């Protein structure tokens, strides 16, 4: 099974240095390979180029650009090369390739003043393609100098852009865009995908992503011990459990879902239906007693169990003992969807987290009422938390904005500190494990931005844990299929009209897609 690793800009820099300094592969050789591979992708994508503008920076990204200029010229394409900066500021491998380009009488025009920038628009508009080789993976913080104005010009003209390694303005470690970034239609990145190419908002600027081999040896990558991975169809397929024809319902998990309250029975229904559609053997929904008749009407295949409730129709502390007894014959507990945070729900959830010895999936209001994160450390069985950014904000007492700009690090640190599997939902859902391994999901779309989608995901995860999958593997498959069902369903129903119950209906097609 091939697992695609994701790297930060710093990690990629260390891989490059190891390749050059420890393995002895010259940086000029790597740069030549990088330029050649980008050129190949450009020629494969654009078959009728007549004029190309290459915008180069002063670093190695610019060096790649000089090679691309030379190779495109050799193909008979007219190339204009602009250097954002002074030639005498260029050093190292980039300088070697600038000199080669100039020895071939290919002019490189310096852009060093506001007046120089004002002269660019006509050339940019007349080009068939712009190659962005300005900033690369090393940038952090506010854009300086002429770059903001040049990036604005590139985005204003109606000319396609190929970005070299990463669109200028996107931070490679996080996907942060401080002010602006080049909007590319194609990005060709080297050796491994960078985190910033996959995480939003940076992902919006990437266009079609191509990852190309430039000859970096496997040993150079292995020495980094990279702990961030991409969830792909291939990975989900390899982890999906096979079902034996010689089996029965007891082989596929006995689930207890504690969910719902007056006015929020839908959450319990969605969680139950999703868990059944994912193949669970037996599903019981524990629900406040007054709304139990509603669940019995809405659910056919799942069993229901009326739990002790308060006057407002939420769980009473008497439910603690009831759930404990039910779990004596159950394999996994999910708690939270639609519970509310009123009355005695806080006591119920926190007590159950200390008492239940089986794996527990905690979502929605179950997350909102955890009053002491330390109890998570004391659990021996797996604990899977599935917060969206708002719930994560409450757990950490941090602003949502701080969490969103650093999703991977936040998820990893929390999972390691509290010994949980954290499924941080959102665009590019992040799964972090107690060992520090992180998985980033690439499936899904904006159709998931609807209340109830998270309840479906909780059902999928709980179902797969009940089918005796390792909790991390269960989370990976569930998150991928959840997103894939949204992609498949929105093709027919559109991203506007797909609702959470539709996700469940399209789940079989998603499963078929990865089975095949």
Image (spheres, rainbow, N blue to C red):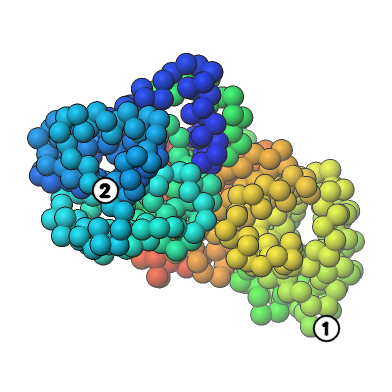
> Can you name the residue that lies furthest to the bottom here?
311
Q: Residues within 10 Å of mark 2 (few under 14, many from 20)?
A: some
Q: Is residue 483 left or right of residue 373?
A: left
Residue 62, above or below 424 = above
Give the Cα distance between marks 1 and 2: 76 Å
**Which quarter of the figure is the C terminus placed in?**
top left
Q: Which mark is residue 189?
A: none
Tell me the residue at 82%/57% (across/down).
Answer: 373
Query: Residue 414's spot in the image, x, y percent?
Result: 72, 51
Query: Residue 64's spot in the image, x, y percent?
Result: 32, 36
Residue 97, above or below 418 = above
Q: Is residue 384 left or right of residue 93?
A: right
**Which quadrant of the figure has residue 57?**
top left
**Observer-nearest of 338 and 134:** 134
The residue that label 2 is drawn on is: 110
Q: Earlier in the sequence, mark 1 or mark 2?
A: 2
**Observer-nearest of 268 and 398:** 398
The residue that label 1 is drawn on is: 311
Tell me the residue at 33%/36% (across/down).
Answer: 63
Q: Secondary structure at mark 2?
A: strand
Tell me the residue at 64%/49% (across/down).
Answer: 409
- Residue 223 seen in the current view: yes
Disc 1 + disc 2, Cβ < 8 Å: no
Query: Residue 111's spot in the image, x, y percent?
Result: 28, 52
Q: Secondary structure at mark 1?
A: loop
- Residue 271 seen in the current view: no
Q: Residues within 10 Å of mark 1 (few under 14, many from 20)?
A: few
């Amino acid at each position: 099974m091939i697992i695609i690793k994701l790297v930060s800009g710093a990690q990629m820099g260390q891989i490059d240095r190891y390749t050059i300094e420890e393995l002895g592969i010259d940086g000029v050789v790597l740069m030549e390979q990088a330029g050649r591979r980008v050129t190949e992708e450009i020629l494969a994508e654009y078959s009728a180029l007549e004029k190309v503008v290459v915008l180069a920076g002063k670093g190695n990204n610019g060096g790649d650009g000089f090679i691309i200029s030379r190779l495109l010229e050799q193909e008979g394409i007219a190339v204009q090369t602009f250097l954002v900066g002074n030639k005498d500021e260029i050093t190292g491998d980039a300088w070697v390739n600038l000199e080669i380009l100039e020895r071939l009488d290919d002019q490189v025009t310096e852009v060093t003043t506001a007046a120089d920038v004002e002269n660019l628009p006509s050339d940019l508009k007349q080009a068939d393609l712009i190659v962005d080789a300005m900033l690369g993976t090393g940038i952090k913080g506010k854009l300086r100098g002429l770059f903001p104005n040049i990036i604005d010009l590139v985005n204003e003209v109606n000319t396609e852009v190929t970005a070299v390694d990463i669109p200028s303005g996107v931070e490679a470690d996080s996907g942060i865009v401080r002010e602006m970034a080049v909007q590319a239609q194609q990005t060709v990145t080297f050796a491994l995908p960078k985190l910033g190419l996959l995480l939003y908002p940076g992902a919006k600027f990437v266009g079609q992503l191509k990852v190309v081999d430039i000859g970096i040896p496997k040993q150079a990558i292995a020495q980094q011990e990279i702990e961030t991975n991409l969830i792909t169809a291939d990975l989900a397929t390899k982890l999906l459990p096979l079902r034996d024809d010689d089996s029965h319902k007891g082989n596929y998990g006995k689930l207890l879902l504690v969910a719902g309250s007056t006015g929020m029975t839908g959450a319990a229904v969605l969680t139950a239906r999703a868990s059944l559609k994912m193949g669970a053997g037996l599903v019981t929904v524990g629900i406040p007693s007054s709304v139990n008749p509603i669940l019995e009407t809405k659910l056919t295949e799942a069993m229901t169990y009326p739990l002790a409730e308060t006057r407002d129709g939420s769980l009473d502390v008497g439910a603690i003992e009831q759930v404990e007894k039910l779990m004596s014959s159950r394999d996994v507990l999910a708690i939270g969807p639609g519970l509310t945070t009123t009355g005695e729900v806080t006591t119920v959830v926190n007590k159950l987290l200390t008492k239940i010895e089986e794996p527990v999936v905690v979502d929605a209001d179950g997350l909102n009422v955890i009053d002491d994160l330390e109890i998570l450390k004391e659990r021996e069985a797996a604990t899977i938390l599935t917060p969206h950014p708002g719930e994560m904000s409450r757990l950490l007492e941090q602003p949502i904005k701080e969490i969103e700009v650093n999703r991977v690090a936040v998820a990893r640190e929390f999972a390691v500190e509290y010994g949980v599997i954290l499924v941080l939902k959102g665009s590019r859902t992040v799964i972090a494990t107690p060992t520090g391994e992180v998985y980033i999901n690439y499936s899904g779309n904006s159709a998931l931005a609807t209340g109830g989608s998270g309840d479906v995901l909780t059902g999928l995860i709980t179902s797969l844990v009940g089918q005796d999958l390792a909790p991390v593997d269960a989370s990976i498959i569930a998150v991928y299929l959840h997103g894939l069902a949204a992609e498949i369903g929105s093709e027919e129903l559109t991203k506007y009209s797909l609702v959470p119950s539709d996700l469940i209906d399209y789940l079989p097609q998603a499963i078929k897609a990865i089975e095949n």
